[in-house]
Amino acid sequence: MTREKGHILPDVLAPGLRIVFCGSAAGHKSARIGAYYAGPGNKFWPTLHRVGFTPRLIAPPDYRAVLELGIGLTDLCKTGFGNDVELDPAHDDVAGLLRKIRRYRPRVLAFTAKRPAAVVLRALGAGKKPPAYGLQDATIGATRLFVLTSPSGRAGAFWDEQVWQELVRLAESPSPSRERRSCIQDGVSANGRATTWCSSSKTI
């Protein structure tokens, strides 16, 4: 887990994760209490548990626990917070996000809203239109890109849990690429101890 100066929430990242979730930015309550997806009515944590990504319902302040499950967390904008319409696009750190994904090489980068997905896909030259939900044709190296319906309580009209279930199937499906196994020591577990990972990274 890494926290840089000025970041609202620290990144929860380590090499070889099966999935990294990326939102636009921390919401108002998330910024206030220092926890991912903490807003009123946010479906992120209940959905992760219900579709099988986590064996128990994780409370927002315990977000660091996902690292032990092979899951990471980050945002496109690390220095601002608020609803999507309140965010200044100038604060989006596309280059920083791409750099982190290329460094840590998760199997899947899943955007928890269309806005961060659209910004990143444009930067990759993958089209100017808002992306469809689900798996994208573009990749970042060997990392596959997936767009989810937003779990925000403000986006209830667009909610579809089936898209999240499709992500589970993708995360668990065999990869056609070549596998390379490596062990590293990185990150912090929920009890504050360093964690050692032996993970399978994919190369093509």
Image (cartoon, helix red, strand yellow):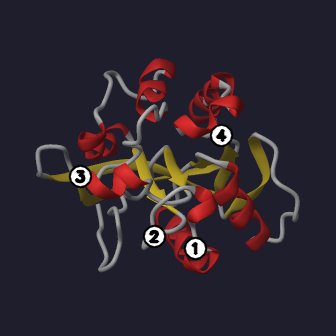
Residue behind mark 1: 92
Left or right, 31 with respect to 166, comes to left
At a point 45% along the width and 63% down the height, the residue shown is 81
The image shows residue 147 at horizontal and vertical percentages of 69, 45
Give the spatial CA distance, label 1 vs label 2. Answer: 9 Å
Give the spatial CA distance, label 1 vs label 3. Answer: 31 Å
- For marks 4 and 2 on the same chain, the one whose residue lies earlier in the sequence: 2
Quick one: label 4, few (<14), some, or many (20+) residues within 10 Å?
many
Type of amino acid at the residue the image marks with label 4: Leu
Q: Up-down: is 99 above or below 14?
A: below
Give the spatial CA distance, label 3 vs label 4. Answer: 30 Å
Residue behind mark 3: 196
At a point 34% along the width and 48% down the height, the residue shown is 198
Front one among 158 and 73: 158
Question: SS at mark 4?
Answer: loop
Q: Nearer the viewer, mark 3 or mark 4?
A: 4
- For marks 1 and 3 on the same chain, the one whose residue lies earlier in the sequence: 1
Type of amino acid at the residue the image marks with label 2: Gly
Q: Nearer the viewer, mark 1 or mark 3?
A: 1
Type of amino acid at the residue the image marks with label 3: Thr
- For marks 4 and 1 on the same chain, the one whose residue lies earlier in the sequence: 1
Residue 148, disc: 4
Question: SS at mark 3?
Answer: strand
